[in-house]
Amino acid sequence: MTADTTGYESEKYLHEYLLFHYGRPEEILPYSFGPREALGFPQRTVSECLRPEALPAHASALDLGCAVGRSSFELARHCDSVLAFDFSETFIRTAKILQQRGYLDYEIKQLANRRVPAVATVPADIDRSRVQFEVGDAHCDPQDFEPFDVVHAANLLCRMKDPGQLLGRLPDLVKPGGQLILTTPHTWLEEFTPPVNWPGAKSGQSDPSQALQKVLSEYFELLAEKDMPFLIREHARKFQWSVSLATVWQRRNISSNF
Ligand SMILES: C[S@@+](CC[C@H](N)C(=O)[O-])C[C@H]1O[C@@H](n2cnc3c(N)ncnc32)[C@H](O)[C@@H]1O
């Protein structure tokens, strides 16, 4: 097992992400008030951003930083094959169990040490055999790949050591005419990404979202941009409400220099 440099190997994160990806609305937000439009984020990055009508038959997808896999399964509604990578061995081991069995028992944190049992379930109408989960590093994996019709990376960039490295590889990872779905809450933190690698740091651009768009627009055309809220429950009385900036791109039909 690799050292837990990101924290995503912990049981705390595992249970939070199982709830975030598979929890029922009333399990995540057990109040009559609260930001309901922030629920279902891992489903919405696919249902609200992917353009299924523009996909070829037998489309392939790559999900980078897939965590426990909900978006990867959602991509399988539209793509015949989905390769899903994450750095965390714990997340991938868990996603593989969900892929094989379709469900997994886990616990939802209430208050202090109190937990209640729950079951994470992959929707029955999804063909789970279309998804392959692998431990991998988005800085360099997958290797020896054919480019994909769809690349999806939700809330990954600001958790990477060097997001510029992935941005540089994206023109080769997405087929000409293919779709790129990126979301990021732009939570740039030194503990994950050295500030010298924050978007715009090297070019002197102070707005990281503008810096990202500038880099991508050389090889991709921006199709859509939207604010997407999401809610992660820590315990029954503590939540993280954040707003990701989602951008949807189409790979231009020009060759890359990479
Ligand atoms: C904030 S979570 C987002 C997870 C998921 N995409 C979602 O939207 O719920 C970031 C994920 O990226 C993974 N990650 C961080 N650095 C990575 C890297 N270099 N390669 C692959 N995955 C990475 C983490 O393990 C974690 O699962």
Image (cartoon, helix red, strand yellow):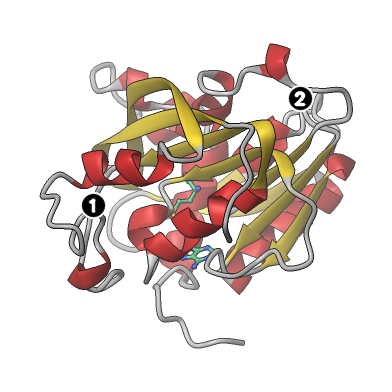
For the N terminus, the quadrant is: bottom right
Judged left or right of residue 231, residue 65 is right
Three-letter residue code for mark 2: His
Residue drawn at (51%, 25%) of the image: 44
Answer whether residue 71 is visible to the viewer in this image: yes
Q: Nearer the viewer, residue 25 or 247?
A: 247
Residue count near mark 1 (Cα–Cα under 10 Å), binned few <14, some 14–19, many ≥20? some
Could you say where residue 249 lies in the image, as x and y percent from the top left? 50, 30
Q: Of marks 2 and 1, which one's residue comes earlier in the chain?
A: 2
Residue drawn at (72%, 64%) of the image: 134
Q: CA distance from mark 2 to mark 1?
A: 30 Å
Answer whether residue 67 is visible to the viewer in this image: no
Residue count near mark 2 (Cα–Cα under 10 Å), binned few <14, some 14–19, many ≥20? many
Judged left or right of residue 113, residue 121 is right
Q: How many marks?
A: 2
Could you say where residue 123 lies in the image, as x and y percent from the top left? 73, 29
Residue 78: which disc? 2
Tag 2's secondary structure?
loop
Judged left or right of residue 80, residue 205 is left
Quadrant in which residue 162 is drawn: bottom left
Q: Which residue is mark 1?
A: 187
Could you say where residue 131 lies in the image, as x and y percent from the top left? 80, 46
Q: Nearer the viewer, residue 110 or 62?
A: 62
Q: Nearer the viewer, residue 5 or 239?
A: 5
**Discs 2, 1 touching: Cβ within 8 Å:** no
For the C terminus, the quadrant is: bottom right
Residue drawn at (39%, 61%) of the image: 163
Three-letter residue code for mark 1: Thr
Judge whether 114 appears above or below 32 on screen: below
Tag 1's secondary structure?
loop
Residue drawn at (19%, 69%) of the image: 195
